Amino acid sequence: MNKFTCKKCGSVKLGYKKFVKCITPVVISPDGKIEYLQSTVDEDNYIWAENSFICLTCGEKVTYCGCDLKTEDELIDYLSKDKEEIEIEEKEYQELLEAEIYLQEQKDKEVYCPDEVVNHEII
């Protein structure tokens, strides 16, 4: 199993975020056991937010192909994948996302661009 390394900052410190300001450090043993350490809570902030694993150093969510990793099973599956496989799948996901964005932009242009409208009168 691979060790966690943040894609953004390179840190190996992993945490779990349950509330906007409730963060729990996480340690993964070599045999894949996950241990949750003492949480820190901002008592002034009680707004609910999504749960997910995060980098304890920079706060970046741990994601795989656009999805936040929220469960231990998702995290272990992700860390068990071959790094080259992850890179290929992430690249394919990014290309698909960019294609979707491009198609949506083209669709928006067709709908909202008035100089492409022919034989249309404004009343």
Image (cartoon, rainbow, N blue to C red):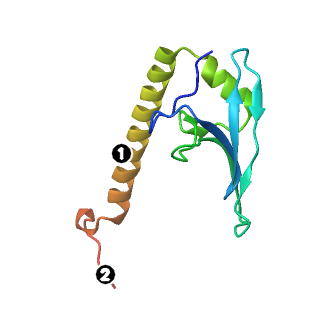
Mark drawn on residue 122: 2
Which one is nearer the viewer's eye here, 88 or 117? Answer: 88
State the image coordinates of residue 55 (x, y, percent, origin top left): 57, 40
* Cα–Cα gap, marks 1 and 2: 30 Å
- Crowdedness near tag 1: few (<14), some (14–19) or many (≥20) residues, C-alpha within 10 Å: few
* Residue 70 image point, x, y percent: 70, 39
Q: Nearer the viewer, residue 81 or 9?
A: 9
Nearer to us in this view, 98 or 3: 3
Determine the secondary structure under disc 1: helix
Residue 65, given in percent of the width and then of the height, sits at 53, 33
Secondary element type, mark 2: loop
Three-letter amino acid code at the position of disc 2: Ile
**Residue shown at 75%/28% (left/top)?**
34
Quarter of the picture containing the N terminus is top right
> Which residue lies under the disc numbered 1?
102
Vertical order, 2 against 18 (above or below): above
- Residue 82, percent across and down? 54, 14
- Observer-nearest of 99 and 14: 14
Q: Amino acid at mark 1?
A: Tyr
Mark 1 or 2: the one toward you: 1
Picture residue at 67% right of the left edge, 58% below the top: 21
Q: Residue furthest left?
A: 115
The residue lying at 38 percent from left, 58 percent from top is: 108
- Classify 83 as above or below 50: above
Residue 36: mark in rendering: none
